[in-house]
């Protein structure tokens, strides 16, 4: 008998997660599990030959970055809805997944009812989040309030040197820090200002009167 069920795939390197999701979703009306994968590469090969309506995708895989994998999935199969299922709760990661074409983002503390709701919403073409992610996305960023980013004394020093065009090795030498420490501060500054590159960082810092 022909049944028009939505094809769902799961990509997660934790077997206990795979098995739990399989048990939960196997008998779900309107859903057929078409494949389970612990690595990104085998799923990509599968996707090239088989239709997948929804994929539950872990962001951290042994062989792939889930954020980049999402972009590749959408390039191969634009109709496939990518639902991130992750332990990562950083707002920046959620936004990156959405920018790369994800239909939704869920934390792994999600309830079974929430998960099923998110899958159904994705199949309807709606952007969907688990309740925990909705709370994260509802929190305004510092820049949304147009208030200055809260920086440590060291971050302010490094920000000023970056705005002067100083490189990481030069900053490290002048402040008697390791280059790795300087890079860590640089990444923290990008995150605090919600920007992706140094040019945007300097502009945001100037807008806030910090340099």
Image (cartoon, rainbow, N blue to C red):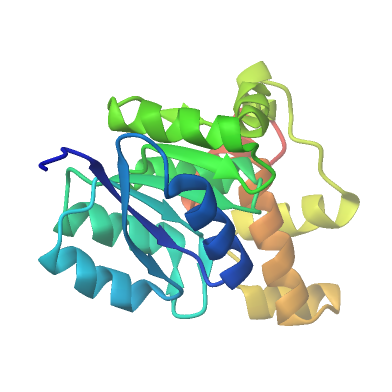
Image point 57% across, 71% down: which residue?
Answer: 15
Q: On the picture, is 186 further left or further right than 121?
A: right
The correct choice, above or below, for 50 with respect to 98 in the image is below
User: Does residue 198 appear in the picture of this structure?
Assistant: no
Rendered-image quadrant of the C terminus: top right
Q: On the picture, is 39 further left or further right than 204?
A: left
* Residue 66 x/y as whole percent: 44, 62
**Residue in the foreground of this view, choosing between 165 and 186:** 186
Residue reaching furthest to the right: 153
* Residue 28 x/y as whole percent: 41, 39
* Residue 133 x/y as whole percent: 61, 33
Q: Quadrant of residue 170?
A: bottom right
**Residue in the foreground of this view, choosing between 72 and 41:** 41
Residue reaching furthest to the front: 1
User: Does residue 37 appear in the picture of this structure?
Assistant: yes
Residue reaching furthest to the top: 145
Image point 67% across, 17% down: which residue?
Answer: 145
Rendered-image quadrant of the N terminus: top left
Image point 26% across, 61% down: which residue?
Answer: 72
Q: On the picture, is 41 further left or further right than 182?
A: left
Q: Quadrant of residue 192?
A: top right
The correct choice, above or below, for 65 with respect to 28 in the image is below
The correct choice, above or below, for 65 with respect to 10 in the image is below
**Residue in the foreground of this view, choosing between 15 and 84:** 15
Image point 24% across, 45% down: which residue?
Answer: 53
Image mark count: 0
């Amino acid at each position: 008998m022909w049944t028009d069920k939505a094809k769902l795939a799961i990509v997660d390197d934790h077997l206990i997660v795979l098995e739990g999701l399989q048990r939960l979703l196997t008998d779900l009306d309107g859903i057929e599990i078409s494949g389970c994968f612990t690595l990104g590469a085998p799923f990509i090969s599968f996707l090239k030959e088989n239709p997948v309506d929804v994929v539950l995708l872990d962001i951290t895989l042994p062989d792939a970055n889930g954020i980049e994998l999402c972009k590749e999935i959408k390039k191969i199969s634009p109709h496939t809805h990518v639902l991130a299922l992750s332990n990562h709760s950083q707002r920046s990661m959620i936004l990156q997944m959405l920018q790369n074409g994800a239909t939704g983002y869920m934390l792994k503390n999600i309830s079974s009812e929430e998960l099923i709701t998110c899958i159904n919403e994705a199949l309807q073409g709606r952007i969907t989040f688990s309740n925990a992610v909705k709370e994260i996305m509802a929190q305004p960023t510092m820049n949304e309030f147009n208030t200055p980013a809260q920086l440590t004394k060291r971050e302010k020093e490094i920000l000023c040197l970056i705005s002067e065009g100083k490189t990481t090795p030069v900053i490290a030498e002048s402040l008697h820090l390791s280059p790795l420490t300087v890079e860590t501060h640089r990444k923290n500054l990008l995150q605090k200002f919600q920007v992706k590159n140094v040019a945007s960082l300097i502009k945001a810092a100037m807008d806030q009167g910090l340099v």
